[in-house]
Amino acid sequence: MRRISRRGLLAAGSVALASGAPQAGGESHRRPILICAANGYAYLEPAYEALKNGEDTLDAALRVVQGPENDPKDDSVGLGGLPNEEGVVELDACCMHGPTRGAGSVGGVQNIKNVSLVAKAVMNHTGHVMLVGEGAQRFALAMGFPKENLLTEHSRKIWMLWREMHSNQDWWGPGVGMPGWTPPEQAPAERRSGIERRLGRWNDVAADLGIEPEMRMDAIRKVLVPPTGTIHCSAANEKGEVSGVTTTSGLAWKIPGRVGDSPIIGAGCYTDPEVGSAGATGSGEENIKVAGAHTIIENMRHGMSPEEAGMDALKRIVRFHGNNMDEIRYIGMTYYVLRKDGAYAGVSMWGGTAERPKRFAVHDGTRRLEVCKALYQGDGIEWPPIPRLKNP
Ligand code: ASP
């Protein structure tokens, strides 16, 4: 039998104390609940049914994240994820299983789409916690995961657009004298010539690459502001068991081999059976530096509510940047926080616009999207202002 230390009793006590108060992001209660990034909304219903019928908390959370992993249209996770700078999709994932205190993780995996399940396999079938790169792929193949090309035509075209838009600095894009060619020394002048002209030219390149008209501005935005994406899902059941999982294709156009926060236990995801589960999407490098998910769990262990715990982690990132808004506006971060008693919160560095507020998804009997509690109002990166983007 596991011995409970005095420290453990004190910690458990502080959680019990905290669980009495209603939370900004939801009442404390003991019923099945799933909380995830908004891109998991469509997959919550069957996962909730399974959880309610007694499915393990990690398996229910895995059901949710496999949705975006399998969806070729979600270009932030799994199949169809935006690739690294060489056009290769590299995936990261990790999971923690509260009841067994198990953890598994994979980083930089190519050609295997369900890396969340590979992370679970690492947890269940090895004595390790983390496998990366080629070794992780070989392990996945040995476990029977199919090998497939993860770069969809949609993502390939956006990657090509990204390459061509660096044409003043490399050999991609039009050759000397070809339409659209500008000598490198004219680049600063072009920068001064205004957004409209540049958008017009990029729109032409996107058209040449066969990107559909309605997708062009989205593609251009992804090139200008390399997107983050990712899905995290945490689950709790009536018994107070908790688990969490995070999976991603990471930052678009990353240097091959770059691994973000998503597969880092304690950053992209952390679960403590005595406290709860938390996970992150957003600027991975920033989140690693504050061990975001672990920080949040420790905050709750010491009595903070889910919302307070998440906001405190966001403020820690801000402090790491000396409160300098010129830096912070480039940092997007959302935390999904679930206490073992069912109290929860979604908190975000930037709240988004009135038309497009930053949201997260919940299912506790009712499936819904809720607006994140934001540290700052508005969109993080001010250029280009997304609502004003129109096809030129
Ligand atoms: N956190 C992920 C990473 O840095 C990206 C994301 O959440 O969108 O790889």
Image (cartoon, rainbow, N blue to C red):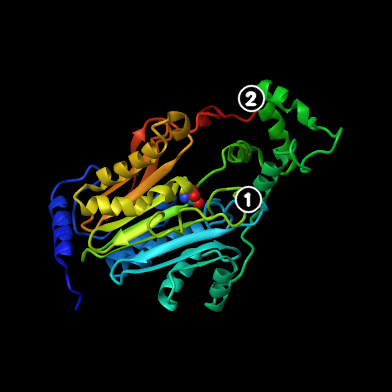
Query: Residue beneath label 2, please?
Result: 195
Task: Answer whether residue 38 is visible to the viewer in this image.
Answer: no
Describe the element under mark 1 as helix, strand or loop: helix
Asked which quadrant contains residue 164, the reply is top right
Identify the mark nearer the N-term, 1 or 2: 1
Name the residue: 36% across, 65% down: 96
Q: Residue furthest right?
A: 177
Name the residue: 43% across, 29% down: 325
Position of residue 151 measured from the top left corner of the image (x, y, whole percent): 64, 57
Position of residue 41 measured from the top left corner of the image (x, y, whole percent): 40, 51
Name the residue: 74% across, 38% down: 167
Asked which quadrant contains residue 129, the reply is bottom left
Location of the C terminus (image quadrant) = top right
Q: Amino acid at mark 2?
A: Ile
Q: Amino acid at mark 1?
A: Ser
Q: Is residue 224 left or right of residue 98?
A: right
> Badge 2: few (under 14), some or many (20 or more) residues near its Cα, within 10 Å?
few
Nearest the viewer among 161 and 318 is 318
Q: Is residue 323 left or right of residue 69?
A: left
Position of residue 260 measured from the top left corner of the image (x, y, whole percent): 50, 53
- Residue 155 badge: 1
Position of residue 29 measured from the top left corner of the image (x, y, whole percent): 18, 55
28 over 235 or under it: above or below: above
